[in-house]
Image (tube, rainbow, N blue to C red):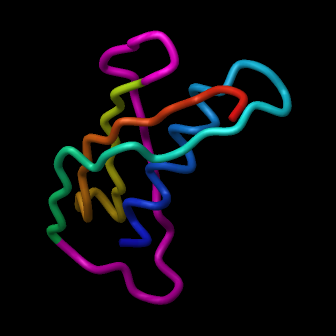
């Protein structure tokens, strides 16, 4: 689950437009895990916005280590002042 948290945190940074805005994870639409990182592994996290619905964003992300994809996920985030 921490790999999905990495994707969600990076997606929050990508989608928040104003300082002080908050956000929340609205849904985990799909998550697939195909490996486990080991202590000392260098992880690369990437995220892209698939769709935007006003203050809701659907994002896809992945976590890669040494050209192995460890996790992929599609998330929905809510962004804005709560």
Work out which residue is located at the far front of the displayed protein and give it. 82
Q: Is residue 4 above or below residue 37?
A: above
The image shows residue 23 at horizontal and vertical percentages of: 61, 39
Give the answer, above or below, for where 36 lies relative to 48: below
Residue at the image point whose x is 53% and y is 84% from the top: 40
Q: Nearer the viewer, residue 64 or 14?
A: 14
Q: Quarter-wise, where is residue 22 in the image? A: top right
In the depicted view, which residue is nearer to us: 14 or 55? 55
Q: Please state the extent of the stretch shown in magenta in the rendering.
A: 35-56
Q: Quadrant of the C terminus?
A: top right
- 82 sits left or right of 70 in the view: right
Task: Please name the residue shown 47% across and 10% down the image.
Answer: 54
Q: Is residue 38 magenta?
A: yes
Quadrant hosting residue 10? top right
Could you tell me which residue is drawn at 31 percent across and 45 percent down?
27
Q: Position of residue 67 (x, y in %)?
A: 28, 57
Q: Quadrant of the N terminus?
A: bottom left
């Amino acid at each position: 689950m921490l790999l999905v948290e990495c994707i969600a945190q990076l997606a929050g940074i990508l989608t928040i437009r104003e300082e002080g805005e908050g956000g929340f994870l609205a849904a985990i639409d799909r998550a697939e895990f195909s490996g486990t990182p080991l202590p000392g592994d260098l992880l690369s996290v990437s995220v892209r916005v698939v769709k935007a619905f006003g203050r809701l964003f659907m994002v896809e992300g992945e976590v890669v280590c040494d050209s192995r994809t460890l996790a992929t996920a599609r998330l929905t985030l809510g962004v804005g002042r709560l």
